[in-house]
Amino acid sequence: MPRSAKQTRTPVMLSKSMHRDLSLYALASSAAGVSMLALTQPAEGQIVYSQAYVELTPGGTIPVDLNHDGVTDFTIQQFRYVSGNQFNRLAAIPSPHGGIQRGASNFLGAALLSGSNIGGSEGFVHGQAIMASTSVFSSDVFGSWLTAKNCYLGIQFHIDGATHYGWARINVGYFGGIDHNLALLTGYAYETRANKSIIAGDRGEGGSLAKGTLGALAAGSSYCPFAGNPEEGRDSGKR
C-alpha cells in the first residue's frame, strides 16, 4: 500500500484590503462582546424623590411611606401633655427595625444640612427620636428642630428585609409654648440600592442640592444652621 505523501503548507499572504476587513471584524466583535457584557451588569441604585406639602396638625401625625409600597416607614408626631409638667413635643418614630439619624444625644433626631451623609456609618435612634421639646418652664426646652427651614431628617428603613436610607425635608416654625406645634413636610427621597448611603437633599438625576450649605459642611458641621441648639443641654429658644 503506498505510503501517504508528506503534506506541506505554504503560508498565504493576505491582501491589505482583506487584512483590514478582518481587523475591523475583530474590533466590531470585541465591541459587541463588551456591549453585551455591559447589558448583563446589575443596575446601579437610583434615588426616587417625592414632592410633598403636608402640615402637621395639633396632636396629629404624618405617616410617610418613602417607597410607596403601602408600608409606613416613619412617622412625624406631635405630643402634648397638659397634666403635671406641661410640655409640647415633636418626634420622629421609625418603623420596626428602622431608625432616625441621631443628633448630639442618643434620643435626639438630627436636623441635617443639605449635603450631609445619611448611611451605615452614622448613628441612628431605633425608637422615638425627639426633634423638639418645649415646656411652660423655659429650662425644659431642647432639640435640634426648635426652628428649622429646609432641614433634613435622616431615615433608615427596610424593603424586603434589606436596609435602605432616605431623607425627609421639613420646616418647623419656632416650636415654643404648648400650642405652637406645626411642622411642614415638603419632600422626601430614598436610595433604591440596599445599604447604599444617600445625601440629604439629593433628588437623583436632574435634582439638585440646596445652596448655601457648603461652607458649613466644609467647616465640619452637618447641623442645619436654622435649627435650634443640637446639643443635649437646654436652649431658651429665644431668637
Image: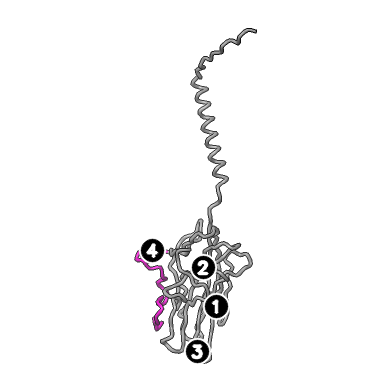
Residue 76, can we see it? yes
Quadrant in the picture for residue 54: bottom right
Toward the left, the furthest residue is 219
Q: Position of residue 116 (x, y in %)?
A: 43, 65
Distance CA(mark 3)–CA(mark 1)? 17 Å
Distance between the Cα atoms at labels 2 and 3?
29 Å
Above-or-below relation of 72 to 58: above
Identified at 54% across, 80% down, the residue is 78
Q: Residues within 10 Å of mark 4 (few under 14, many from 20)?
A: some
Of tags 2 and 4, the one toward the viewer is: 2
Task: Inspect the magenta stretch and tell me whether residue 6 lies in it.
Answer: no
**Circle nearer the viewer, 3 or 4:** 3
Disc on res. 86 = 3
Q: Which is in the foreground here, disc 2 or disc 1?
A: 2
Taking the view exactly as shown, the residue that stands out farthest to the bottom is: 84
Secondary structure of the residue carrying numbered label 4: helix
Magenta segment: 211-239
Q: Is residue 150 visible?
A: no
Mark 4 belongs to which amino acid?
Answer: Leu
Labelled pair 4, 1 in contact (Cβ < 8 Å): no
Q: CA–CA distance between discs 3 and 4? A: 39 Å
Q: Crowdedness of circle 1 by 10 Å Cα count: few (<14), some, many (20+)?
A: many
Asked whether the residues under the numbered discs 2 and 1 touch, taking CB atoms below 8 Å apart as contact, a structural biologist would say: no
Q: Indicate which disc residue 171 carries.
A: none
- On the image, numbered disc 2 is attached to which residue? 155
Q: Earlier in the sequence, mark 4 or mark 1?
A: 1
Circle 3 crowding by C-alpha within 10 Å: few under 14, some 14–19, many from 20: some
Q: What is the three-letter code of the residue carrying label 1? A: Gln
* Quadrant in the picture for residue 218: bottom left
Give the mark, 2 or 4, whose residue is nearer the N terminus: 2
Give the mark nearest the N terminus, 2 or 1. 1
